[in-house]
Amino acid sequence: MNTPWWRNRRLLPLLVQAVVGLLVLVTIALLLGNLVRNLSAAGLLLSWRWLNLPAGFDISETLLPFNAELPYWRALLAGLVNTVRVVLIGLIGATALGTLVGSAAFSSNGLLRRLSRTYVELIRNVPLLLQLLFWYFVVFLSLPNGTAAIQLPWAVLAKSGLYLGSTQLIDGVWHGSLRITLEFAALLTGLIIHSGAFIAEVVRGGVAAVPRGQWEAARSLGFTPGQTLSRIVLPQALRVIVPGLNSQYISLAKNSSLAVACGYSDLYSVAETTLNQTGRAVEVVLILLGTYLAIDLIISLLMNRLNQLVQIQER
Amino acid sequence: MNHRLLPLASRLRRELFATPLDGLISVGLVVGLGAGLQALLHWALTQADWAVVQANSTLLVVGRYPLEQQWRLWLLTALLCGAAGITWGLLRGRGWPRSDRLAAAVLLVLGVVLPASLGLTAPIQQRWWWITGLLLLGRWAAGCWGAALPLRWRRLLPLAWPVLYLLGLGLIGGGLGLMTVRPSQWGGLLLTLIEASFAILVCFPLGIALALGRRSALPLLRWCSTLYIEFIRGAPLITLLFLGQNILGFLLPGGLAPDRVWRAAWILTCFAAAYVAEAVRAGLAALPRGQWEAARSLGLNMAQTLLHVVLPQALRVALPATVGQFITLLQDTTLLSLIGLLDLLGVARAVMANPEFLGRNAEVYLVLAVLFWCCCAALGLGSRALEHRLNRHSLRSEP
């Protein structure tokens, strides 16, 4: 009864929370009040009707058919599909590269081990945007055209694009069963090489977390190196790797928004054009934030399911 | 000679040719790497035209900072280098261990070779010599007589850094009798460093507060912090910068919205704070509950527990991850070029758009990459050294 009120263990938490809650509410109210006032002064009060107006701009490459007469929402959807395309292929590529490089860190070959380290250190200390610009402007845009293009049995890499499948040169222009634009190829290369370095670290950490004794025990039981890896080490390493992969995958999805540097029309780049044409800043930003949040959540959900699969099944 | 060569040969054999497959891989790698390196050297020495970097070095470093005001930046550089030398000397004392001799040699070579290779004029080259000399002089003097200073003075010396930082911002921005240089005139490496240092300094306490909030027993604090952290972490930085440039003006009362440069700085800060909070939270989680309970039962109040028991230990655990976030933040400043600010990358892109230097992308990007790589690697190295120092300290204090 004698405790002063500022030492009261029931009252104090309530008081602190009340003050914090009030502060947050007042700040939000002030910000929203300003937003509504400023928006109505500019004649831009929240409305979604503009989404049905014709976009008036074209998108250089889309999976969904798109032209300038289609409405804004179709443009944004085409951008989203482009984002999803680069993220999906990027995830697969980066995982493959990361696993390769990460396991190279355990190779018996010293040169390979050092090369793996060098690659990771090199990539992690250079900004991704710089890397993307480098791939697009320095590497891909300086590719030769016509007969000088880089030709492989199943692919041709020329300045006009990457041609896959059966390729042929007609009047100095390449044709193939599948053409991938340089913008997409540059973005994909940059993202895969960047994320690959981070995933390699995750894989390396995961494999390093498996005690040496596990390797030795498996080998002395007569497992071949391949069996040791697939039956003993990998199942244990995956428990450490999967949560790390989750955050790297989300990073990759968010990093894909730098596509604008390579001139690839992803969601962010379409949204930027949309904003410039309509001035609908709040709506565009809401769409962007909501969509990226949704992509992150979907990746997280899938990876959490995977995580449950690889965790120890305790009885 | 034989006894020195033999271990090398056997080591090479074990490292590179342990099995036939290893041998094959090694030979392939050596051939591939050799060809790549040769091509790179061939390009750098014969095909590359480094004039684009030489002609624009001032632009790349300070952007469109007015020429007649650049003495302020020189003064600031000299002050910073002097302070760095003195701090270095105080930390190391009289001796010059091998790492220090190596660092001094590297600094000397950089101070002489870099300005010369950039093709700077003789007076400016000499300024760099003076600045390098000042740094090493500070190291030497503080090493010799630092220990003789009264302890009370030496305690106050770390405070010189925040004072110097504020002084530096004043020198750069002007005011108080100096001509004002508006933030829109800052550019290049200068802008990158201002944005990164500001964001790093402010996001750290913010991140600690958010991490404590997220682990608080009070539900409202926990929810607010969690909501903020997850919201920020769910969004790509570029969309947040986009939000800052396009919506912040609507959110704040007319005229109160900061300049575009400071808007970006605040967005970077708020963005990094969420990630730093997660790093600090991991450090807090690593701390046994008993530490809290012991401190509380000794009669320490909440603030004392945090300040003297919890945070020193948690931050030590969180140090590598936190510095990792700072490195990411430094790299993320390149995104400012996408929203039209003239940071290092923004200036570089402007330079490359100049018809005079068309097609010289590779040289500029390479220089930028080396610069970023050195800064980030130095931060990482510093973090590891600090970690080592702190761990050594903790081992000594525990019997």
Image (tube, rainbow, N blue to C red):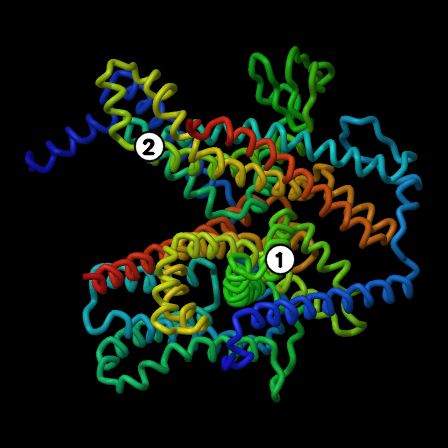
Of B196 and B291, which appears nearest the observer?
B291
Amino acid type at image mark 1 = Val
Judged from the image, the secondary structure of the residue bearing numbered disc 2 is: loop
Residue A14 in the image: above or below residue A95: below
For residue B347, the mark is: 1
Q: State whether residue B189 appears in this view.
A: no
Judged from the image, the secondary structure of the residue bearing numbered disc 1 is: helix
Image side of residue B389 versus residue B365, left or right? left
Amino acid type at image mark 2 = Val
Q: Position of residue A252 (x, y in %)?
A: 58, 39
| Image mark 1: chain | B
Identified at 77% across, 42% down, the residue is A270
Identified at 40% across, 57% down, the residue is B319
Identified at 76% across, 36% down, the residue is A79
Image side of residue B252 versus residue B159, left or right? right
Image side of residue A42 versus residue B152, left or right? right
| Image mark 2: chain | A
Identified at 50% across, 49% down, the residue is B369
Query: Depth-wise, is mark 1 or mark 2 nearer the camera?
Result: 2
- Mark 1 near mark 2, Cβ–Cβ under 8 Å? no
Q: Quadrant of the C terminus of chain A?
A: top left
Q: Position of residue A241 (x, y in %)?
A: 45, 34
Residue holding disc 2: A210
- For label 1, count other residues whose C-alpha is less than 10 Å away and answer few (under 14), some (14-19) or many (20+): many
Task: Give the spatial CA distance, label 1 vs label 2.
Answer: 47 Å
